[in-house]
Each structure stands twice: as structure tokens, then as C-alpha cells.
Image: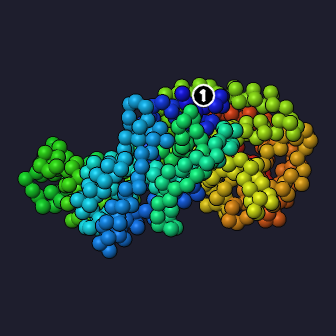
């Protein structure tokens, strides 16, 4: 059964921030350290720092010839079957890394000499050059290294959705990037039956073929070799004269493949040792080939049909009554709708986030993960700090006025961000509220965009046309009204 079914969440994958895994079988998705390292959100940045801390420490141990210590650090990699990700066909079994397997991984790493020869500089490079390390192994290794980040994420999602947690659940080993050591302990945890489950953000997984040895060989190594054979005019150069008498010279990749084992990691190691600039070009350009998995594709991968949930969400606005009694239900509905509308641009919602040592609370906080569009333009074009997106939900029977705007503005700072939404049921004088938001903005206290039920319903209905520009345009128009007042 999937997580949503076990806890009767009545939510589809599109409404959830995590991969809605079936705990009885692995889902063929992978944590990709290269992908995580190139994401703009704060969670990915912190997780990437931990990954880099581990591998850079391994590099330093190799350089100081402390191979024994480096080998010991690999021994702490356990079997990460808690995420239910991978490629096993039966019950999740952590097929990638056990103690014996970890020793084999280190053996392949050491014998490849990729560290000794300065071929690799980052953890994700191992999948390109080291034998017996593929996407599944690198994903398992990554899971262990950032296990604490994943556990913290799991706790926040369970608290957001009301999923019960157990106390004093063993964490398993995770890497402490500051102390440069493996640690373990006890935390709150998600336990189903007798199994510990760790939730994985849907925006942190991939099945992309961009950062693989095959892509590197096909599109970079072979391209380089084509140019070299043309330059040297070797026997692999073929000529053809057109009807106009123009002589064209070509080197075909199929001929190169027949002459050299370009897709073998041993060959790629030798090639990269001679031409490191080709691999550096690959690393830089691979970034443009990766993107978050869309909700429809993710639903297809996990085997959950993408049903029409829009009408159901719209109905919830009419069934949840205004007032303090149903404030929590309204908060969760708004979170679900914003996840549905704005993924992958904002991610990782956390409900009732404490700030100022717990003296103040923010209803919902999202990470700004945008690499284009409205949320990206906030800080790059509008110069509005927006590392986090704050959301205050007011399930009021009365109008929103200055005290509510002052409340959310009081949460803003340059470090956390100065942009947010105030979401409410309805209002009698919307133009006055826009003027009040403009006053807040002009006083340099931050930018607040008001959204009422009617707006969210309109945006949900716009998705039926599959025109994402409607949402982006709507937000830009409302921001313009506030700025230009």
C-alpha cells in the first residue's frame, strides 16, 4: 500500500511533496547527488554540503595516504531500505549497500585510482568512472550520507499531514558534515508495522540519463574523438562529394565505437586522465539536462493514476466552514492546493514553523525552488528577498485588515525572505486590502500577496486547460497591482 492509502490522506501524488511510495515494493527512482547539488532550494543546498563534506574528507584521507581510515568510513554504510526506492522487484531489501557490499564499493573505488589520479572531484563522479557503481548504488550511498536530512524532512511532512510519529526510533548512521564523522541516535520516526519508513522529497529524485557514463561517452567523448580524427585526417575519415562538387568529410560514431571501447569505465578513466577538459565541459552542460520529475510522470512511475482531483479540491472549499474550529483543516487544504498549483517552483511545506526561538509562528513555510518564472523573478528581477515563501492562513469570518498584514510582515527578514501570501476565505473590500498590501511594500516591510478562496478556485480551474502560464500571469498581475499602487 502507498503512504497516502495507509494513513487515509485522500491525496494524490500531485498534492504530496514526497514520493508516495508503495512500501511493499521498491519504486524505480533514485537520489541523485549531482541533481541535488544543482537545485536552488535550501534543503538541497544543506544536503549537498553534507555529501560534499563526506567525499572531500575521503579525498583528503587518500591524499594523506590514510587509506585505512577511508575504508573504515565506508564500513558504516548500512542497508537503506527505509525509502522504498531502487530497482528490486520484491519487498524493499536495501539491495545496494550492506557491510560486505560497502567493502566491495571501496575496493572498486581504490582499484580504479580515480582519486589517486585526480580524475574525480565530486561524489557523483563515481557513477561515471568506478566499476560496479551505478545509479542504484550511488543512490544508496547518498541516502546513508544525508539520512539525517531525510529524517528531518519525514518528521516535518508527518507533522504537516497529521501522520502519527513514534518516539525514540533509531536513526541509523548518518554523516555529520561539521564533525566529519558518522553518528547515530534516536529521533521521532515514521513506523509502519515494525518497519521504519523515511520519506523522500519528490523534487530530489530523478531517473534522468544526463549524468551517466553513457551520456558522457556518447555526447562528449565521441564528439571529441570525431574532431580529432578529422583534424588528423585518419583512416576513419570518410569523404563524399555533393552534386555541386563540394567535398564533405565525416567521421561516424559507429566507426569510433567499433574501434574503441568508449562505453567502458576503464576507457573513460584513461581518456579523462588525458583530456580532463572534456569531462569538465560535460559536468557544466549536464546541468541543463536535468529537471524535476513532473507530477504526471511521477504518478506513472509509482503506479498511481493521475485522477482529476481538481473538482474534489474545489468542493473542499465549500465543505470546510470558516472559523477557528476548522482552522487546521483549512490550513491543510491550502497547503495541498498550493503544492498542487505551484510545484516544482515552491517545495517542502512546513506547517507552523517557529521563529524567534518559538516566540512567533508562521502558518506554512515553503522553500523557493524556482529556476524560472514568477518565484524565480522575485529575487532576480524584482529584488524581493524570497529564499522562503511564507503563507498565513486565516479561516476567518471577518475581513483581513492591517493587524493580519502586520503579523506576516513581522515574520519577514532579509535572511528568511520578505515575500509571502495571506490566504483567506472572502472579503468585502478587496481594493482596500490591496492598498494596505501596497503600504506594507512601500514601507519596505515586505511584499504580501492576498489570495482568497475565489482566487485559488480560479487557478485550479485554469489547470484543466493545461496552461501553466495562466498561473504565472495571475501572480504577476497581482504583484503589479501592489507595486504600482
Is 274 placed above or below 405 here?
Answer: below
Residue 358's quadrant in the figure? bottom right
Q: Give the quarter of the figure containing the C terminus.
A: bottom right
Residue lying at 74% horizontally and 49% vertically, measured from the top left: 352
Give whichever of 199, 82 is nearer the camera: 82
Q: Could you tell me how many numbered marks the image carries?
A: 1
Q: Secondary structure at mark 1?
A: helix
Q: Position of residue 239 (x, y in %)?
A: 12, 49
Q: Is residue 97 left or right of residue 156?
A: left
Q: Is residue 396 left or right of residue 240?
A: right
Q: Position of residue 310 (x, y in %)?
A: 67, 29
Q: Is residue 65 left or right of residue 168?
A: left
**Res 140 visible:** yes
Q: Position of residue 210 (x, y in %)?
A: 37, 48
Furthest-left residue in this view? 235
Give whichever of 374, 311 is nearer the camera: 311
Q: Is residue 379 left or right of residue 269?
A: right
Write down the residue under mark 1: 5
**Res 38 visible:** no
Give whichever of 312, 11 is nearer the camera: 11
Q: Position of residue 70 (x, y in %)?
A: 35, 64
Give whichever of 484, 338 is nearer the camera: 338
Amino acid at each position: 500500500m502507498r503512504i497516502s492509502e495507509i494513513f487515509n490522506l485522500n491525496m494524490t501524488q500531485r498534492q504530496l511533496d514526497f514520493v508516495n511510495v508503495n512500501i511493499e515494493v521498491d519504486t524505480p527512482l533514485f537520489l541523485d547527488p549531482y541533481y541535488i547539488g544543482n537545485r536552488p532550494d535550501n534543503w538541497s543546498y544543506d544536503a549537498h554540503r553534507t555529501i560534499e563534506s563526506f567525499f572531500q574528507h575521503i579525498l583528503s584521507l587518500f591524499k594523506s595516504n590514510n587509506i585505512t581510515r577511508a575504508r573504515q568510513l565506508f564500513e558504516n554504510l548500512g542497508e537503506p531500505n527505509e525509502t522504498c526506492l531502487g530497482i528490486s522487484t520484491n519487498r524493499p531489501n536495501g539491495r545496494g549497500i550492506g557491510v560486505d557490499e560497502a567493502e566491495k564499493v571501496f575496493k572498486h573505488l581504490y582499484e580504479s585510482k580515480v582519486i589517486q589520479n585526480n580524475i574525480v572531484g565530486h561524489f557523483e563522479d563515481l557513477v561515471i568512472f568506478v566499476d560496479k557503481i551505478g545509479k542504484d548504488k550511488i543512490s544508496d550511498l547518498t541516502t546513508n550520507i544525508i539520512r539525517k536530512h531525510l529524517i528531518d524532512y519525514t518528521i516535518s511532512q508527518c507533522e504537516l499531514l497529521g501522520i502519527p510519529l513514534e518516539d525514540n526510533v533509531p536513526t541509523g548512521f548518518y554523516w555529520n558534515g561539521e564533525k566529519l564523522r558518522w553518528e547515530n541516535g534516536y529521533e521521532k520516526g515514521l513506523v509502519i508495522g515494525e518497519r521504519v519508513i523515511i520519506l523522500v522529497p519528490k523534487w530530489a529524485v530523478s531517473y534522468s540519463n544526463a549524468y551517466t557514463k553513457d551520456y558522457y561517452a556518447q555526447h562528449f567523448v565521441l564528439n571529441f574523438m570525431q574532431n580529432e580524427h578529422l583534424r588528423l585526417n585518419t583512416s576513419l575519415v570518410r569523404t563524399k562529394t555533393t552534386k555541386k562538387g563540394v567535398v564533405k568529410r565525416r567521421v561516424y560514431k559507429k566507426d569510433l565505437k567499433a574501434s574503441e571501447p568508449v562505453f567502458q569505465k576503464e576507457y573513460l578513466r584513461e581518456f579523462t586522465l588525458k583530456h580532463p577538459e572534456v569531462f569538465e565541459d560535460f559536468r557544466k552542460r549536464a546541468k541543463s539536462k536535468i529537471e524535476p520529475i513532473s507530477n504526471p510522470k511521477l504518478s506513472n512511475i509509482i503506479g498511481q493514476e493521475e485522477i482529476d482531483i481538481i473538482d474534489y479540491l474545489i468542493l473542499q472549499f465549500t465543505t470546510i466552514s470558516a472559523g477557528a474550529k476548522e482552522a487546521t483543516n483549512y490550513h491543510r487544504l491550502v497547503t495541498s492546493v498550493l503544492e498542487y498549483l505551484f510545484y516544482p517552483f515552491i517545495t517542502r511545506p512546513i506547517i507552523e514553523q517557529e521563529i524567534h526561538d518559538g516566540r512567533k509562528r508562521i502558518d506554512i513555510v515553503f522553500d523557493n525552488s524556482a529556476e524560472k518564472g514568477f518565484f524565480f523573478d522575485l529575487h532576480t528581477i524584482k529584488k524581493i528577498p524570497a529564499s522562503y515563501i511564507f503563507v498565513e492562513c486565516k479561516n476567518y469570518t471577518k475581513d483581513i485588515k492591517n493587524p493580519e498584514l502586520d503579523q506576516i510582515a513581522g515574520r519577514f527578514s532579509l535572511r528568511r525572505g520578505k515575500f509571502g501570501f495571506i490566504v483567506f476565505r472572502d472579503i468585502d473590500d478587496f481594493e482596500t486590502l490591496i492598498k494596505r498590501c501596497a503600504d506594507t511594500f512601500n514601507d519596505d516591510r515586505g511584499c504580501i500577496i492576498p489570495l482568497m478562496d475565489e482566487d485559488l478556485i480560479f487557478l485550479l480551474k485554469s489547470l484543466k486547460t493545461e496552461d501553466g502560464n495562466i498561473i504565472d500571469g495571475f501572480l504577476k498581475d497581482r504583484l503589479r497591482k501592489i507595486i504600482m499602487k
